[in-house]
Image: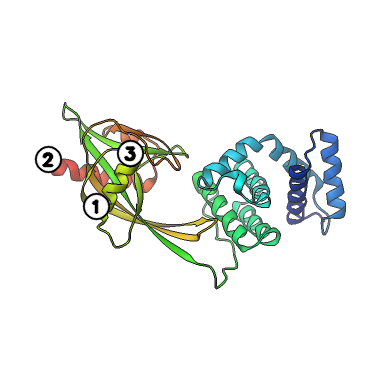
Amino acid sequence: MAHRNLSRSAIISTLYALQMYPLSDTESIQQLITYIGNHFSDGNPDYNFVEHTVFSVIKKQSIIDDIITKAAPRWPLENMNTMDVIILRMSIYELVFEYTKTHPNIIISEAVSAGQIYVGQSSARFINGVLSTVYREMGSPMGPVRPPRIDMSAETIVTHQYKGGGFVYAFDLKGDAYVALVQDIWGFWTFPKGTCDKTEDILLGSAREIEKTIGIPVVSQSILGESEYSSFHPQKGNVVKHVTYVLAKAEFVTLTLEDSAGLVTAKWFPVTEIADLRMYDNVAQISITAINRIFNSQ
């Protein structure tokens, strides 16, 4: 009986072989799949599934690689471990294009397991972080996924990172209110922010980081809210990010995207139009709080 986990092992081996020794014609690739299935799979893989997935990944590789780059913007594809890339390509294809056929829990869990087997624990955590990001940005269409079991050794270090940013507003000469937003690589409009020191005044730190991001001085007025989320960095390991959002006022002048890591552009929007923008839920909620605070103080 064919098993999907055995099949995924054959897929990984085939894609890795093609990465090392590229083949272009269909017949040669089919022969490679058969050879790997017969000689390197511990069991009986589903050859139809293996062949379908291998050829689909090849066909959509440029799209998949773009997704990987967006999910890990600070880690260039060419600097990633080759096996990590292969596992991610296979898993992202299933996750994005065929998530209705196999539940994301299984896709992510088996990818993490493959990372542990072929590379190690750091690879497993990195793969889990990238795939979880991709699935979250898809809108979690099959519901939330269970965190896969990863061996967290005693040497695993959790880094805490503190960020400040927020809702930057200004009035034009007519007295109309605008908000300065930045667009990330996923197409969402969000607040400019940056890294602060845990011990510094968060209002001052947030103002500094906002200016570094959009190129204009601001004055922080009050704290709007806070959030916390976890991520994985290939070099730093597990990172817990604590973000404080402030209400900040500025002059209505041209924005310049200075610190552009993971960002595409910066733009002023009339506050009356931001409800139509693609925004993260917490950004939308904090925007409502900010607008109420601005106009209640007028």
Would you place residue 157 above or below residue 134 in this image?
Answer: below
Reply above or below: 162 against 91: below
Mark 2: which secondary structure?
loop
> Residue 200 appears at what percent x and percent y?
27, 59
- In the rendered image, the quadrant that contains the C terminus is top left
Binning the other alpha carbons within 10 Å of mark 2 as few (below 14), some (14 to 19) or many (20 upward) gives: few
Of all residues shown, which one is farthest toward the bottom? Answer: 154
Q: Residue at x 53, y 47 (%)?
A: 72
In this figure, which residue is indicated by the disc labeled 2? Answer: 298
What amino acid type should be assigned to the residue bearing mark 3? Answer: Ile
Query: Which residue corresponds to the image point at 33% horizontal and 32% vertical from the top-left?
Result: 267
Which label was assigned to residue 173? none
The image quadrant of residue 287 is top left
Q: Secondary structure at mark 1?
A: helix
> Between marks 3 and 2, how big is the CA–CA gap?
26 Å
The amino acid pointed to by label 1 is: Leu
**How far from the left and from the top, in percent, is residue 133?**
52, 49
Above or below, 12 relative to 122: above
Please tell me how crowded label 3 is: few (under 14), some (14-19), or many (20+) other residues with Cα within 10 Å.
many
Counting residues from the start of the chain, the first of labels 2 and 1 encountered is 1
- Please name the residue that numbered disc 3 is placed on: 214
Measure how far apart labels 2 and 1 are at the Cα level.
Answer: 23 Å
Q: Amino acid at mark 2?
A: Gln
Front residue of 123/272: it is 123
